[in-house]
Amino acid sequence: MERSPHPGHFLVLEGIEGSGKTTQIERLDTALRAAGHPVRNTREPGGTALGERLRGLLLDPDLPGMCAESELLLMFAARAQHLHEVIRPALQAGDWVLSDRFTDASFAYQGAGRGLGSQRVAQLEDWLQGDLRPDLVILLDIEPETGLDRAVQRGRRDRIEREALDFFERARQAYRERAERAPGRYLVVDASADPDTVAERLLAGVRERLPLHALEG
């Protein structure tokens, strides 16, 4: 992993619905804390009071008619507050920031899934983030059919989870293409196995990219 332009470290877990991000970010959080590191565990959309309210709007299955442009701008509105209130201060304090999704999700979901294209997302990314990018993006890769089956088992689906299969196929492909273009900044993990196996593979991959002694084992 390249040296960060800030004292902390910024790791992001990405993947389509049902890829197991919530479970795996908790495992990674535990491993980092056990190694003695200060960790800020957060999520998008969300992570702040404003972000959580916007999350409620974005995922509300009873809120019909939201256009793709509104969805993208609401995502970045939540992200702006997230950066201002959580991510930048934590990184400057030397913490490890673990985020369940970040801007790769906008390239995948709004850029590819909604068909807005990557250029609009990239313009917002550059304007809002400047040169700030995650030190490592961990992509939990899974077939959309498998992921959606898992999502259905969780109960009532949110607005995004109700999209058609081809929406998630486009999102997955966008994720994979971004990882292929920058392999040094992405760790792709097969998320189709059981959670323990995925966690083992994820931690092994992360250990190869983190500073020496960052993780035990």
Image (cartoon, grey):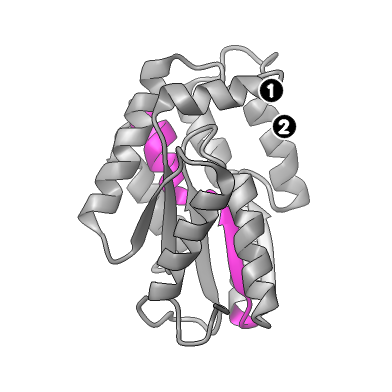
Give neighbour class at mark 2: few <14, some 14-19, many 20+ (Cα, 10 Å): some
Residue located 63% across and 70% down the image: 31
Element type at marker 2?
helix
Place of residue 176 in the rendered image (x, y in percent of width and height, measured from the top left): 30, 43
Identify whether 194 is placed above or below 86: above
Between 197 and 31, the one lying in front of the other is 197
As shown in the figure, which amino acid type bears the numbered disc 1? Asp
Is 99 a magenta residue?
A: yes
Residue located 73% across and 46% down the image: 50
Query: Is the C-beta separation of discs 2 and 1 under 8 Å?
Result: yes
Identify whether 196 is placed above or below 66: below
As shown in the figure, which amino acid type bears the numbered disc 2? Gly
**Residue segment shown in magenta:** 92-113
Between 194 and 50, the one lying in front of the other is 194
The extreme left residue here reads 181
Q: Which quadrant holds the C terminus?
A: bottom right
Identify whether 136 is placed above or below 93: above
Residue 39: image quadrant is bottom right
Place of residue 15 in the rendered image (x, y in percent of width and height, measured from the top left): 46, 41
**What's the mark number on residue 56?**
2
Residue located 54% across and 55% down the image: 199
Number of callouts in the render?
Answer: 2
Place of residue 207 in the rendered image (x, y in percent of width and height, measured from the top left): 45, 73
Element type at marker 1?
loop
